[in-house]
Amino acid sequence: MTTDISPLKANRPQPKWLTILRIILGIIIVWKGFSFFKDAVGLESMLKTGGFEILNKNSQIIAFIITYLNLLGGFFIVVGLFTRWMCVIQIVILLGAIVFVNSKQGMSFSNTELLLSVIVLILSVLFSIKGSGYISADEFFRSYTKAGLEPGHTDKFFQ
């Protein structure tokens, strides 16, 4: 008796609450990007007090990169496009925020910035593993490219 795992069984759709959680994660990251955009000087000063010389010299460039990666990455996570890659990029940014910035302010969970960073880090790790899910741009484009080859792939979008 052989077990045949078809691609449809291997890529089971995620629950809808996980999709809502992905959208909330993206909104939080976009919101944080807007707050960095609004207070770029504050982000630069946080980078300068991080204690590393490379961050001191390049704080404007790094603040620019972090701001726009948060804005772009959060938007992509909301719509479900390149979700795994964007979450991996956010993991790197969040690890830097937790280690360099929040460690200077104190590593207690009464620090709300640290708590938010840890929650977003956990969700980013989750979605870098699980992917964007059933309701996403990734799934739409995956089904759209298969539409000409196999019947029934676009039925779920046009019902």
Image: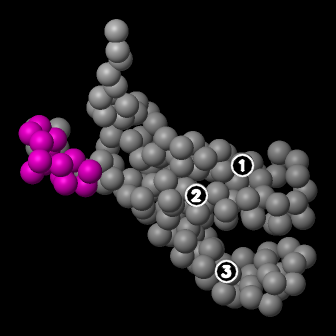
10 Å neighbourhood of mark 1: few (<14), some, or many (≥20)? Answer: some
Q: Residues under labels 2 and 1: Cα distance?
A: 15 Å
Q: Earlier in the sequence, mark 1 or mark 3?
A: 3
> Which portion, as a residue range, is magenta?
141-154
Circle 3 — which element?
Answer: helix
Is 147 rendered above or below residue 156?
Answer: below
Disc 2: CA contacts within 10 A as few (<14), some (14-19) or many (>=20): some
| Left or right of residue 64: residue 17 | left
Q: Of the residues shown, which amino acid type is indicated by label 3? A: Ala
Q: CA distance from mark 3 to mark 2?
A: 18 Å
Residue at 90 percent across and 76 percent down: it is 51
- Closer-to-camera residue (106/124): 124
Question: Can residue 145 be seen by looking at this rendering?
Answer: yes
**Label of residue 88 in the image:** 2
The answer to if 147 sits in the magenta stretch is yes
Name the N-terminal-most of marks 2 and 1.
2
Judging by the rendered image, the residue that carries numbered circle 3 is 63
At x 26%, y 51%, the residue is 142
Of labels 3 and 2, earlier in sequence is 3
Furthest toward the top, the residue is 1
From mark 1 to mark 3, how far is it between C-alphas? 20 Å
The answer to whether one can see residue 116 in this image is: no
Residue 117 lies in the magenta-colored region: no
